[in-house]
Amino acid sequence: MVFLFKITELLEKQLKEVLQWHVKSPETDYLETSDFPSLVSRQHYVNFELWHQEDMARDPDAPDSKIAAVKRAIDVLNQRRNDMIEQMDQYLLNVLKKNNIHYTENAEMNSETPGSIIDRLSINALKIYHMDEEIQRPNVADEHRKKCSGKLSVLNEQRIDLKKSLETLLADLNNGKKRLKVYQQMKMYNDENLNPILYKKEKNK
């Protein structure tokens, strides 16, 4: 296997980091190294921040100015999230090219990239933490705990299934049974040259 990391360790780290970050935000240098596990952690932390911004956006008592600021923060984080998915996929593609992995004649592309699966596992880790938090929450009805326990069971099952899917895809890429491409995101709404609301404002200045 050309990929020098273990999926089980990466995914255990995701769960541990959610616990750690709810106590203390990570140091800057913790997220700055460029090996693959660090890329996974950096993308995971973006999702961590995004999760809590999304919570704040649902506050019915927040003033409009606060909601506007939160929505703008969410927009920036979503862009960063997608950038990081692309960076993870590009890293893996570079490893495959460096190791001269050749595709078999019938190699197909997977509709979901490794980075996208890792992103889903990141969100899954956050859901697991917060669903368990609901189970442990004081002064809630037993019915609430029961419903949350059922959902937590499904989330844990989903994590196992996603892990298997990721392992299979990476093995297929390693063996040339599948091929990986990294497409630029073609995001338009954040680009001042492609979003008409933005470029019309620039023109009228």
Image (cartoon, rainbow, N blue to C red):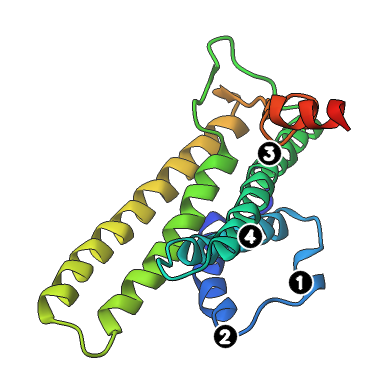
**Mark 4 falls on what kind of element?**
helix
Res. 69 mark: 4
Residue type, mark 4 in image: Ala
- The residue under label 1 is 30
Q: Between marks 1 and 2, how big is the CA–CA gap?
A: 15 Å
Q: Between marks 3 and 4, how big is the CA–CA gap?
A: 26 Å
Relative to 154, residue 179 above or below: above
- The residue that appears at 46% across and 65% down in the rendered structure is 55
Residue 96 percent across, percent down from the top left: 72, 33
Instruction: Decide which of tag 2 and tag 3 comes sooner along the chain.
Output: 2
**Mark 2 falls on what kind of element?**
loop
Label 3 CA crowd tier, 10 Å (few <14, some 14–19, many 20+): some
- The residue that appears at 54% across and 49% down in the rendered structure is 119
- The residue that appears at 54% across and 41% down in the rendered structure is 116
Please identify the quadrant where the C terminus is shown.
top right
- The residue under label 3 is 86
**Mark 1 falls on what kind of element?**
helix
Label 4 CA crowd tier, 10 Å (few <14, some 14–19, many 20+): few
Residue type, mark 2 in image: Val
Instruction: Decide which of tag 3 and tag 4 comes sooner along the chain.
Output: 4
* Residue 151 position by quadrant: bottom left
- The residue under label 2 is 23
